[in-house]
Image: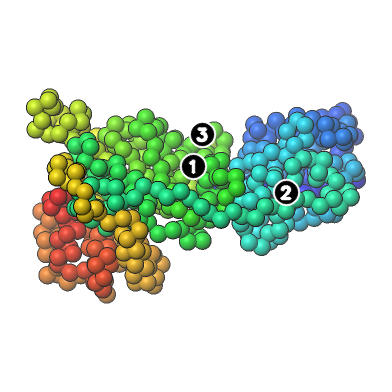
Amino acid sequence: MSYARVLGVGLVGMTGHLVEVEADLAPGLPALTISGLPDTALQEARDRVRAAIVNSGETWPNRRITLNLLPATLPKYGSAFDLAIAAALLGSAGRLPLLPLEGVVLLGELGLDGAVRPVRGVLPMVAAAARAGVTRAIVPVRNATEAAVIPGVRVRAADSLHQLVAFVRDGTPLADPPPVAATTTAPGPDLADVAGQGYARRALEVTAAGGHHLALLGPPGTGKTMLAERLPSILPALDDEAALEVTALHSIAGLLPPAGGLLRRPPFQAPHHTATVPALVGGGPGLARPGAVSLAHRGVLFLDEAPEFSRGALEALRQPLEDGHVQLARARGATEYPARIQLVLAANPCPCARPVGDTACECSPLARRRYLGRLSGPLRDRIDVQVTVPPLRAAQLMETGEVGEPSAVVAVRVAAARAAAAERWAAVGHRLNAELPGPVLRRPPFRLPARDTVELRRRLDSGSLSARGFDRIIRLAWSIADLDGRARPGRDDVWEAIGLRTGEES
């Protein structure tokens, strides 16, 4: 036999495609050619696979070898095809009967000693194979747990090429994936730790209830970072669909815990202010990897000291905030990652980070305006809630009696508000108030009465409020009503939403 074919999976962004790995042996000078748009890592597979086959006790076929990866028009990235290439080569040389591998996806990188090493993105790869009708997969041992969360696919684990050969030739069983460990995450920061700041806590709760973006402005030491870090603690756990998306993104980035199952806690990303544009939105050579905005998908992206971030990095967030996904264009094609996040910004009032009016502050009013001006108008217009966090009084900081509500109590109200919103918007295909298109809110049956929106319309006509801001205030009003258990927002809810949007009632 001089021809053999096995199955692998190619990954472009989060989209997987079934790939046929073909091997053909022909008379001629010994050589190996790989076709099918391979990248550099895949071109180097010839040396890895050759050493792995020889060091596993097999014979390398000294003939003219052609490897083809179908479909040939799809770019192929990474080393996950090594195991499939080795099996196809041995099969085409007549040294490995491939009937046991019929309809089986092979994933894994080969070490020079024949060891099958883990690769990134196994979870979305196995999910793509399942969508294509494949029901069996062989993956590296360290990737077996994440692959096993995909229903309908029988996953087996191999730790070496020799073990795979023994399974095919002699029926020696491969290891089953270990049982998925119960997700036990350490308790995170609790909202009860925040002293005072009742208005900011209310803003945080409204933010969580509707999935809105939040800006916290004020002098240092007032609790801005503490509040932002506690936002995930009041968000509901991820459902199956969202958990699968989040886990797949972390699998592609190589950040998935080896013994865990689906990630159920909303992710929290807090990049340093020196983060570059690729670090925030994704990038890199070959297959562009997800950045912080995608790793925070279905969770929170927190930018502390936001004006210190580069202008380009901040402006790169505008498109993901509107569309909920990131598109990364490269010479060989475009990659898309989801990025449905809640953005939280924190900023001091001036570069010296001293309270305004402090005698030690030497910043002029112009310097303070320029500092906050680094957050451009278009970016701030996309932030639903913008509140000023005032300095704490000594009585608030030293209070030993009544403390603020813990996260568990607030989370119950947030979950109830989100459930009400999901039931209301199910007919239009949305779950959160922040995701709702503006035209839906401005038309019956959800359009608010004119008497309740008179102030909004006045500000819109005067130019002090944009059309985008108008829609965002209406969405905030719905979130406030959901939190307070009302079926529809009223005038008071609209006024509170205006205050949260403009900071006028802080």
Depth-wise, is mark 3 or mark 1 nearer the camera?
Answer: 1
Does label 2 or label 1 sit earlier along the sequence? 2
Residue beneath label 2, please? Answer: 157
Residue placed at 67% from the left, 37% from the top?
A: 79
CA gap, disc 2 and disc 3? 30 Å
CA gap, disc 2 and disc 1? 27 Å
Does label 3 or label 1 sit earlier along the sequence? 3
Residue beneath label 3, please? Answer: 284
Residue placed at 26% from the left, 73% from the top?
A: 487
Q: Residues within 10 Å of mark 3 (few under 14, many from 20)?
A: few
What is the quadrant of residue 272 in the picture?
top left
Residue beneath label 1, please? Answer: 290
> Mark 1 is on which residue type?
Pro
| Residue 402 makes an appearance in the image | yes
> Mark 3 is on which residue type?
Gly
Looking at this view, is 290 or 138 the one in front? 138
Protein image colouring: rainbow
